[in-house]
Image: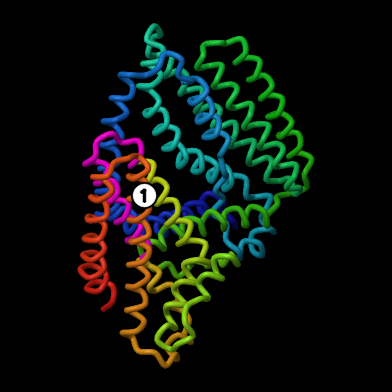
């Protein structure tokens, strides 16, 4: 006899075992140190910034938008797998307890974002509204948690609707109403907050009535959504270790690939071409490199102390280079590469050259940012530090620990 509760426990245990195995690699010593540094530096400058907070700062708009987006993004994790489309459809009428447990799990696992945002915005709220009791903000956080649960239920109900356009309109409407509710709540305009809450209730009831009319469960849609979320997790984990479950996505990016094709047609440049094309067309490496480059530039621009600017520049060079290391084994499952008449030393040299070039591009761009800020000492400092880092990282870390 099929037991939905027992089935959920087995599926949940397997899911936690799978994710915890990769989380150990993601939150390793390197990332833990970087996160500790980020949090410490951000807390220090956040406190200094609050001391000089402008009187007309749009606190309500910022908190309302962020809280609205956080509660609106409430995906339902169902932990389904492809064989379930065959073996569980017959037991669909018994799956109620299973899906109820997955919704509880989805709610709990998403609370950390809400709590982090609540802790981050607490000092801003108290500084912007010093005449209010601090308990008012705690009640606001409680309302955020309630709306989080409502949005999760609405998302689950709309997963029965097959038309993506209808789901998109519903998601947009709920997002706008969520942001409006928290904007008015933070400003203290409770009348308008109540009106927008009533409007959200109408949308909420509409979602429920719409789901009741739908025949059965959209198994394919649930599986697709859950599979996409796991692939996103695997792509992040793949930056730190090999993930055999990852399905690599390839994008054309013709204009960037055209630049790569200028590599000479020579046997010694075989892996130069391969690694550059993989970096450009893979859905992982180019996006990660660009995001870290931009975030590092923002830290350099806004942090006032020149030594911290240089430290952030080095930190983001390290993070970018460290994330690119997994590119060396990106094609590990393709046997044809072993048939290339190219020596292993050529392959290693090509990869080291790519790391040199990417790190040097980042160094030059950060140096130009210092020039834009008219900080000539910082520009020379980041060039010197960048060149030293590139040499030590590639020669000291990559060639001794990766290329063995």
Of the pair 226 and 378, the residue shown nearer to us: 378
- In the image, taking residue 237 as reference, residue 86 lies left or right, namely right
Instruction: Name the residue at 44% across, 51% down.
Output: 291
Of the pair 190 and 387, the residue shown nearer to us: 387
Magenta range: 300-324
Residue 303 percent across, percent down from the top left: 31, 36
Asked if residue 320 is among those painted magenta in the image, a careful observer would answer yes
Of the pair 352 and 230, the residue shown nearer to us: 352
- Could you say which quadrant of the image residue 151 lies in? top right
- In the image, taking residue 16 as reference, residue 398 lies left or right, namely left
Residue under pointer 1: 368
Which SS type dominates the magenta stretch? helix
**Figure check: 53 above or below 37:** above
- In the image, taking residue 99 as reference, residue 202 lies left or right, namely right
**Figure check: 186 above or below 335:** above
Residue 207 percent across, percent down from the top left: 71, 34
């Amino acid at each position: 006899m099929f037991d939905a509760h027992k089935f959920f426990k087995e599926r949940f245990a397997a899911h936690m075992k799978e994710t915890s195995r990769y989380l150990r690699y993601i939150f390793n010593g390197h990332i833990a140190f970087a996160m500790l540094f980020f949090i410490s530096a951000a807390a220090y400058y956040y406190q200094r910034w609050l001391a000089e907070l402008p009187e007309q700062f749009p606190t309500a708009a910022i908190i309302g938008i962020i809280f609205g987006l956080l509660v609106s993004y409430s995906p339902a994790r169902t932990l389904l797998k492809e064989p379930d489309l065959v073996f569980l459809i017959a037991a669909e009428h018994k799956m109620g307890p299973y899906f109820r447990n997955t919704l509880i799990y989805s709610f709990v696992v998403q609370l950390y974002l809400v709590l982090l945002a609540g802790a981050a915005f607490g000092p801003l709220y108290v500084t912007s509204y010093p005449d209010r009791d601090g308990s008012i903000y705690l009640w606001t956080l409680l309302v955020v948690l309630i709306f989080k649960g409502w949005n999760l239920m609405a998302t689950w109900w709309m997963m029965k609707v097959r038309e993506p356009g209808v789901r998109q309109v519903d998601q947009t409407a709920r997002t706008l109403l969520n942001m409006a509710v928290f904007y008015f709540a933070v400003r203290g305009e409770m009348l308008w907050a109540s009106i927008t809450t009533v409007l959200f209730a109408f949308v909420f009831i509409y979602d429920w009535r719409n789901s009741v009319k739908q025949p059965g469960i959209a198994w394919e849609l649930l599986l697709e959504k859950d599979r996409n979320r796991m692939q996103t997790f695997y792509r992040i984990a793949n930056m730190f270790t090999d993930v055999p479950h990852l399905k690599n996505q390839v994008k054309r990016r013709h204009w960037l690939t055209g630049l790569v094709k200028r590599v000479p047609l020579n046997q010694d440049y075989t892996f130069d071409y391969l690694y550059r094309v993989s970096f450009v067309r893979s859905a992982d490496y180019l996006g990660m490199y660009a995001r870290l480059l931009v975030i590092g530039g923002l830290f350099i621009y806004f942090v006032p102390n020149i030594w911290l600017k240089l430290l952030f520049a080095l930190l983001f060079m390290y993070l970018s280079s460290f994330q690119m290391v997994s590119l060396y084994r990106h094609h590990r499952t393709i046997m044809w590469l072993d048939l290339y008449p190219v020596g292993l030393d050529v392959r290693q040299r090509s990869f080291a050259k790519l790391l040199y070039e990417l790190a040097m591009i980042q160094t030059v761009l950060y140096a130009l940012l210092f020039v834009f800020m008219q900080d000539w000492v910082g520009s020379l400092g980041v060039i010197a530090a960048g060149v030293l880092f590139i040499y030590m990282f590639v020669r000291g870390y990559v060639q001794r620990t990766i290329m063995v």
